[in-house]
Amino acid sequence: MSSERLPIKFRTENLDFYYGPTRALKNVTIDCYDKKVTAIIGPSGCGKSTFIRTLNRMNDVIAGTRVEGRILLDGQDIYAPDVDVVELRRRVGMVFQKPNPFPKSIYDNIAYGLRINGMRDRKAIEATVEKSLRGAALWEEVKDRLDENAFALSGGQQQRLCIARALAVEPEVILFDEPCSAIDPIATAKVEDLIEHLKTSYTVVIVTHNMQQAARVSDYTAFMMLGELIEFDRTGKVFTAPANKLTEDYITGRFG
Amino acid sequence: MKTSTRKGIAQAVGFLALRAAMGLVLAVLLLFLYDIGKKGGGAISWEFLTEAPRRGMTEGGIFPAIVGTFLVTLITAVLAVPLGMSAAIYLHEYAKQSRLTRLIRLSIRNLSGVPSIVYGLFGVILFVNAMRFGTSILSAGLTLGLMTLPWTVTASEEALKTIPNSYREGAMALGATKWQTIRTNVLPYAIPGMLTGTVLGLARAAGETAPILFTGAAFYLPFLPRSLGDQFMALPYHLYIMATQHHAIQQVRPLAYGTALVLIGLVLGLNMTAVVLRYRLRRKHR
């Protein structure tokens, strides 16, 4: 395991997660470093999506689930009783597997997060919408059609719109839950470029079952299997000299 | 080759049977509308719609019944719409899916199958007697409201079910509270469906006789109701009287058909409103 002296943004300590009686995460301990990209890879059903959804407590809405262990964001336990989940989710944004624009205009999609967080000033909203769309490398493509319905965009554009929507509320961390599994290769390349760019300002955690993607975009890689963390290290190390036989088998395509 | 011919014949026969079934249903409906239209059309006039019955209801119009039905439906709506929608929002968005909520849901479905006369008797006990509203437009409206509630709850919940979960998760991931999520990213898209189901329920209530029979509808009243505590005339009850209880049934038959036509027109109008409403709201949001 790595032992670098980088500032830690997210740390999970002995994290267990249960869907009813089923234990989906087993004793997972990972550090996600500040302003780095951490990729979670592993075969289907290994718990990587469950893991990322514990980081913004999105699993809370599923009945019968339970968390054990601790998750620290800037050293503070996000499952502590006095934590404001709504504020946590504003600080920890999320981009979902399938692009999920709201059935509103492009403009209103971005402005939505600002309005629910209490921003009323029209000028400020307008400026933030532009900044967010620029941040998601979508501005040039949509600046003349902000009033159009977001469903009119292509799948890849919709996903970048969702990224822009997440950027608008100025989170500190952005979670990507297999963001490219529903879009084509060219759109995927754009999203990957974007992630590369985002890490200058944000901490990024990305779940992917595309190993090349993890190798391309991430600084650190965690390999999970059956709810357990098998290996966690610098991405270069995991892909060139994995410490664990299981990791090696997986990245060389022997299973998965 | 042989099997494909056989399949082709089976398909043709199947389609024919389905078409015939639909044609039959449509034919019955059209025949029914034609018959009532032919027999009642002659009775419809400006006076018929705007005047009170005269001479033991052998002459004059049905204005008090129209007003009565309108008012009682309004009270029904005031009770059933906000309560039904709220209950549906609670059941679908807030309540944990447990054995209790399944039981509640099952009970609501069953309530929508309870015969309307049972609601009528329940209304007598609860509103007329226990709550001392007397036989009044209020008691009748509340009784109809109770009867409509299961419909509005069920229809509203079905409408909420059609909203993809990704709208809810997307909003919450941006730091929206549960209520903000529901208010700004679920309800705006669910309301067209909720309203459609609700208006259909109201249309059904407007045509009911049994629930208002003992709770507030009057045989004949020379005046319009002036307060919620007054009795009232209503179209379905008026029709029932004209068709079965009147002392000169043969003589007033055209008036009965005219009343039926107005009642059908009213229900049809409400249903059309539901369709138009849904269409308009949908377009606004797409």
Image: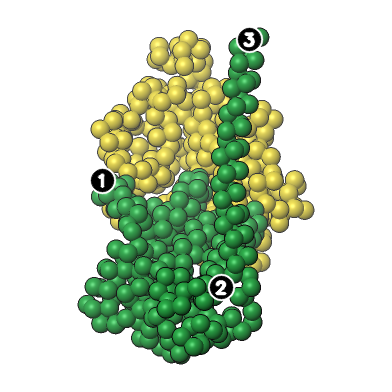
Chain colours: A yellow, B green
Viewer-side residue, A99 vs B14: B14
Q: Nearer the viewer, mark 2 or mark 1?
A: 2
Name the residue type under label 3: Lys
Q: Indicate the secondary structure of the residue bearing disc 3.
A: helix
Q: Mark 3 vs mark 2: tell me if same chain.
A: yes
Which is more foreground, mark 3 or mark 1? 3
Whether residue B30 is situated above or below residue A48 in the rendered picture: below
Q: If you read the primary sequence from the N terminus, does the residue marked by circle 3 or circle 1 appear first? A: 3
Label 3, label 2: how many angstroms apart (C-alpha)? 61 Å
The residue wearing badge 3 is B2
Q: Quickly name the residue at label 1.
A: B99
Q: Which mark is residue B33?
A: none
Residue at 66% over, 9% down: B1
Asked if residue A214 is positioned above or below residue A123 in the image, the reply reads above
Marks 2 and 1: CB-CB under 8 Å?
no
- State if disc 2 and disc 3 touch (CB < 8 Å): no
Give whichever of discs 2 and 1 has the lower sequence position.
1
Q: Which residue is mark 2?
A: B254
**Mark 3 → mark 1, Cα distance in angstroms:** 53 Å
Chain at numbered mark 1: B
Chain at tag 3: B
Q: Nearer the viewer, residue B88 or B216?
A: B216
